Image (cartoon, coloured by chain):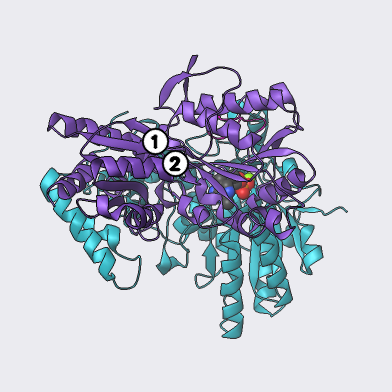
Chain colours: A purple, B cyan
Amino acid sequence: MAEMNLIQAVNDALRVEMRRDPRVVVLGEDVGRFGGVFQVTVGLREEFGADRCIDTPLAESGIVGAAIGMALYGLRPVAEIQFGDYIYPAYDQIVNELAKIRYRSGGEYAAPVVIRTPIGGGIKGGHYHSQSPEALFTHIPGLTVVCPSNPIDAKGLLASAIRGEDPVIFMEPKRYYHKSRADVPEGEYTIPIGEAKVVRSGSQVTILTWSAMVHTALEAAQKGEAEGLDLEVVDLRTLVPFDEAAILASVKKTGRVVIVHEAPRTSGFGAELAATIAEKAILHLEAPILRVTGFDTPFPYTLEHEYLPDADRILDAVGRVLSF
Amino acid sequence: MKLEVTRVIDDEGRVLHPEREPALSSDELRRLYRTMLLVRILDERMLRLRMQGRMGFYLTSLGEEATHIGAAHALRDADWIYPAYREIGAALFRGYPLGTFMCQLFGNSEDPVKGRQMPVHHSVKRLNFVSVSSPVGSHIPHAVGTAWAAKLQKTQDVALAFFGEGASSTPIFHVSANFAALYKVPAILLCRNNGWAISVPSSGQTATPTFAQKAIAYGMPGVLVDGNDILAMIHVVREAAARGRRGEGPTLIEARTYRRGAHSSSDDPSKYRDPAEPKEWERRDPIDRFLKYGQARGVFDAEFVAHTRQEINREIGEALIYAESRPPKPPLHSLFEDVYAEIPRHLREQAAGLEAEIARHGEKVPPRG
Ligand SMILES: Cc1ncc(C[n+]2csc(CCOP(=O)(O)OP(=O)(O)O)c2C)c(N)n1
Ligand SMILES: [Mg+2]
């Protein structure tokens, strides 16, 4: 075990996987000489050379498109998109090419590309350095979508993503890059994709969440405890495929659900979870399923803490499902 | 393929090409000098504010002042400017007030963009200086579309897009160049080649020795110019604008300059670049060169220079006091405005929810650390 923040944990996963498998290459803007604008790829060029840690021109569609071609030829590319907000120029390559190549070739070809990108607000980044676009990828058959909240999960899930046979969108909560620290297993370490984790067990209300909001939900649960509340927090970790069994087990236990995500409400991934719970566990519910989310506006600069869901907003929703 | 770098003055401000030297009045020369110096001093002061934590982010154009201020001078006020994020001098040249500029940096109650964008993402419609978008290259096709519309409506306006050499790698740059040339629109695509895109040197963007030569493939003139020579900038942008107004289509200009500062206040160039390189470019400082030129012409005497500096410092000081004493946040409700022309039902509900929440729990305070 070694204490690491999220940046160090992702760096460690990349390093360990690059040592293990010479097919793994990292590419993106500023990832080589500089080690990435968040310093996630620091030292990789020194250890593995400029051919395996590649500074690309400024073109996200080129990064993803070339990664697809590399993967088809047998490499294991890990592409970095500098901010989740800049993934859209590559959206066509991701949606129409990366996600569909296995299916459209009748299973002949596969492109196991991992796309890493930092997401979320709380860093005074305004609307082009703060978005949470995960739902846009959950809607695309063929993509696996992973959203870790902490260093241990980030390391273990990234290693699994790199070893897997399918493309993975791997979204890192930049607000917790430095703040989230943990003892992370050293060396080779994987966590299976598709498993949620109960990060706080409780009996009264289930809070379903992922990424940065896990920390906010835990803060709410702690604050709630002081008021005599007993809240369960489930970190989904993987959105597609999400861990339906774990979610339903928690819902059946508490009978009350609050879903928390930072992304805007309309067509957010919370809607998918609410629909699934309604389909499969409606008779276990004691109250309507509530969502606490970002607003349906672009992410603001000055008013970002008005925008971001916080413990108060979560506890208000908890109060409503409890008093229903 | 070799293109000549268009210059008018040398590094010492001596005229190399009198035939290209724009005929400028003493007042125009003073205004150009003043705007460059304003940007230089403003950048220093604002960066310091950022370091003191009084503001969230800043980004300078240190060493690149001549490129965009010269271009702005060469245009008419009715011409549209689509800036990237390093050309604030173009707006200041057109009269953007310093107080408003600073309110945008603070994102406060008098920020014209209502605290929605990061600092340096200005929008000044009245000066035809279009809202800055962070995604690199995204605005280049908009300049093409605007120029196209001007052509269709026969207004004689041109549209100019500023962008970095990094932006020339984006697909949308190439699409824009193709559209512009195909429809012969009066657009000027002005690539500021400042040597770096964050940590990637310009040699990491393209295999061609110049960016200007890409114009040939699209079917338009490509011009290489010394971006630290404000007179050369005025010369080439005037020619490009005139070509556009004559119906002869777009021009791609590569202005050679150098980013002497960090990419932004969040960047640390010591991690990727030899500090001798920016030092070397100090010798080619665009303001010093122009000062020498103006002195030789007898327009910039010592008193003018000292007085200008003093006046700029006073104006910045006053603007800062003004901006820092405005209420720090835009109104809560503004969060929900301008998403659509009218606020729809679901956003009205979300606004009411937030107002009730704040009434219940009090003002939001950013978490510490
Ligand atoms: C589409 C997109 N990708 C990445 C970024 C992050 N980014 C911001 S500025 C920049 C470099 C831009 O370099 P250049 O175009 O040369 O302009 P300069 O900063 O040198 O003025 C990058 C990679 C972005 N803003 N937009
Ligand atoms: Mg540049």
Q: Mark 1 highlights which residue? A: B50
Front position in the image: A77 or A125: A77
**Dominant SS type (magenta):** loop
Residue A38 forms part of the magenta stretch: yes
Vertical side of A156 occupied by B131: above or below: below
Query: Does mark 2's beta carbon lie closer than 8 Å to ligand 1?
Result: no
State left or right for residue B268 relative to residue B331.
Answer: right
How far across and how far down the image is residue A151, in percent? 47, 27
Farthest residue, direction bottom: B153
How far across and how far down the image is residue A229, in percent? 16, 34
Residue depicted at x 61% and y 81%:
B151
Given the image, on which type of amino acid does mark 2 rest?
Answer: Tyr
Kindly state the secondary structure of the residue where label 2 is placed: loop
Residue B335 visible? The answer is yes
Q: Residues within 10 Å of mark 2 (few under 14, many from 20)?
A: many
How far across and how far down the image is residue B5, in percent? 77, 52
Front position in the image: B294 or A307: A307
Q: Which residues are magenta?
A: A32-41
Kindly state the secondary structure of the residue where label 1 is placed: helix
Label ID, residue B58? 2
Residue A210 forms part of the magenta stretch: no
Residue depicted at x 81% and y 47%:
B207
Disc 1 chain ID = B
Vertical side of B133 occupied by B365: above or below: above
Q: Mark 2 near mark 1, Cβ–Cβ under 8 Å? A: yes
State left or right for residue B74 relative to residue B122.
Answer: right
Given the image, on which type of amino acid does mark 1 rest?
Answer: Arg
State left or right for residue B125 relative to residue A155.
Answer: left
Q: Earlier in the sequence, mark 2 or mark 1?
A: 1
Disc 2 chain ID = B
Front position in the image: B286 or A111: A111
